[in-house]
Image (cartoon, grey):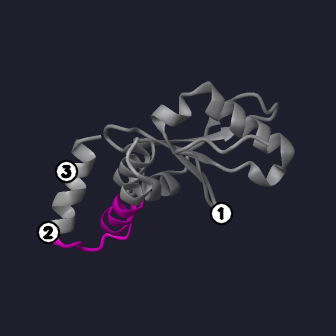
Amino acid sequence: MSKTPLGLVYRDNCIRTLKTVWNKKSTKDHYINSVKRSAKNAKPIIVIDDNDFSSECFLINQTLDDFDIHHDPILCRQIELIGKYMKIKYDILSSNQSQEDKQKFCTLNEQQNYWNKEISTKDEKALDKFVKEL
């Protein structure tokens, strides 16, 4: 079994990822192989645009070798709302920073951009600086 590509996130009702991750052949191959192993892995894939956080939804086709566009505006909108969180988390995790820094800034990102909680001004400035340097 191959390792799940960074940025491909499995959830109960869907799989979410960024467009740059989805456009890699290895990501699509990983997903196709996972569906072939278990039908439970056949879920809608929400692909978030890295720039404007719009999204598209796909389903694997019947022959398990390609993808069809799937229209689910509610699911797409839910994922679009956390697009910034996804992008920043991917950038942090794919950086060559220390594990300690990655953990710290992933937590701050999650609080601010996933849970929509206010973080201190100091932490917000540190997160912004860290992300800009990536």
Main SS type for the magenta part?
helix
Instruction: Say which residue appears at 43% left-offset and 55% top-offset.
Output: 77
Part of the protein shown in magenta = 103-121
Of the numbered discs in the image, which one, if any, rests on residue 86?
none
Of the numbered discs in the image, which one, if any, rests on residue 129?
3
Question: As rendered, which of 117 and 129 lies closer to the eye?
Answer: 129
Instruction: Say which residue appears at 68% left-offset and 50% top-offset.
Output: 43
What amino acid does circle 3 point to? Lys
Q: Is residue 106 above or below residue 90?
A: below
Q: CA distance from mark 2 to mark 3?
A: 12 Å
Foreground disc of the pair 2, 1: 2
The residue identified by callout 1 is 12
The reply to whether the C-beta atoms of the residues labelled 2 and 3 are less than 8 Å apart is no
Position in image of residue 28 (x %, y %)? 65, 32
What amino acid does circle 2 point to? Thr
Position in image of residue 45 (x %, y %)? 60, 45
Q: Is residue 33 above or below residue 102?
A: above
